[in-house]
């Protein structure tokens, strides 16, 4: 059977999150996905007053398909899985820029692996205009800390994925933030070094899935005090290359097809 690309483009992500929170987006943004927003609002019992968006870098849909049990901690807390199509190029700055601007790469301006500070409107700017308290928690030298820099939000730079998880749990515990974007790339690093299906890479998948589980447990303890949108949202995948390593940036389905999970807590 021939490979197929997923139907929904990644640029819809910002619209989905904003609509679930009852926030109007700039007209330039790709719209929400109507049926998905309707389901999310129904399960939230209205609009979310908080969003926690977990981005495990480079986890492609084919990894979910081949190693499904590794994601049991994600399935345990989510109720919707939606396939998405990454950007061209399928690299982190391009993909995350589209996710948080609702724009195609040619429109937001990042089309290759470069990391300039975005000057166009982002979901972070929309949140801030709405008076929402916002934080980014990311590993050292994360793309999030570059392309979304310079905004009146809190930036937390952590040494590794475990430290990101601990800081995120701390922030959830303080109940200070209305939106937290979280970025880890232990899987991406391991897949580049050892291959997308190596023991080291799959161990990183498990580590990040367990981190998501811990975040979800913490959020579930606040059920009733908040209506929270929680997502597990990768940016692209990886494919194997000569020498046993991994790479991405191509139009191969391994790089392009990803799976996002949504929870209404």
Image (cartoon, helix red, strand yellow):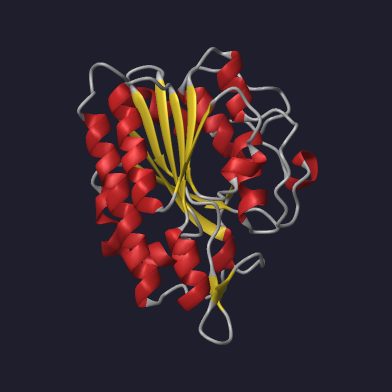
4 left or right, relative to 35 = right
Image coordinates for residue 143, horizontal then vertical, percent: 60, 48
Foreground: 47 or 247? 247
Image coordinates for residue 74, horizontal then vertical, percent: 30, 49
Which residue occupies 36% across, 37% down?
168
Q: How many marks?
A: 0
Quarter occupied by residue 226: top left
Q: Is residue 4 visible?
A: no
Q: Residue furthest bottom?
A: 243
Which residue occupies 75% across, 47% down?
110
Which residue occupies 74% across, 46% down?
105
Foreground: 79 or 230? 230
Foreground: 149 or 130? 149
Foreground: 228 or 134? 134
Q: Above or below — where is 141 with respect to 262? A: below
Q: Is residue 156 visible?
A: yes
Image coordinates for residue 122, horizontal then vertical, percent: 65, 30
110 left or right, relative to 214 = right
Q: Residue furthest left?
A: 221
55 left or right, relative to 65 = right
Which residue occupies 71% across, 23% down?
27
Picture quarter with the C terminus: top left
200 left or right, relative to 57 = left
Q: Above or below — where is 5 with respect to 169? A: below
Image coordinates for residue 153, horizontal then vertical, percent: 55, 25
């Amino acid at each position: 059977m021939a490979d197929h690309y997923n139907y929904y483009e990644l640029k819809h992500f910002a619209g989905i999150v904003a609509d679930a929170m009852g926030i109007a987006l700039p007209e330039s943004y790709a719209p929400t996905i109507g049926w998905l927003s309707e389901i999310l609002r129904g399960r939230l019992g209205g609009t979310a007053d908080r969003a926690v968006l977990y981005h495990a870098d480079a986890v492609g849909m084919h990894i979910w398909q081949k190693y499904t049990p590794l994601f049991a901690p994600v399935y345990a807390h989510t109720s919707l899985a939606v396939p998405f199509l990454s950007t061209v190029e399928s690299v982190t700055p391009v993909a995350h820029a589209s996710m948080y601007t609702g724009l195609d790469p040619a429109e937001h301006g990042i089309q290759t692996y470069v990391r300039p500070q975005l000057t166009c409107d982002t979901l972070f700017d929309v949140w801030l205009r709405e008076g929402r308290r916002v934080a980014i928690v990311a590993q050292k030298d994360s793309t999030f800390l570059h392309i979304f820099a310079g905004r009146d939000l809190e930036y937390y730079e952590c040494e590794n994925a475990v430290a990101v998880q601990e800081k995120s749990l701390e922030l959830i515990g303080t109940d200070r933030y209305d939106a937290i974007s979280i970025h880890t790339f232990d899987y991406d690093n391991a897949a580049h070094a050892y291959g997308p299906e190596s023991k080291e890479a799959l161990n990183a998948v498990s580590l990040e899935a367990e981190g998501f589980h811990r975040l979800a447990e913490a959020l579930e303890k606040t059920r009733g005090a908040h209506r929270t949108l929680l997502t597990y949202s990768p940016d692209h995948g990886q494919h194997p290359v000569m020498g046993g390593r991994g790479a991405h940036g191509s139009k191969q389905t391994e790089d392009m097809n990803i799976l996002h999970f949504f929870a209404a807590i």
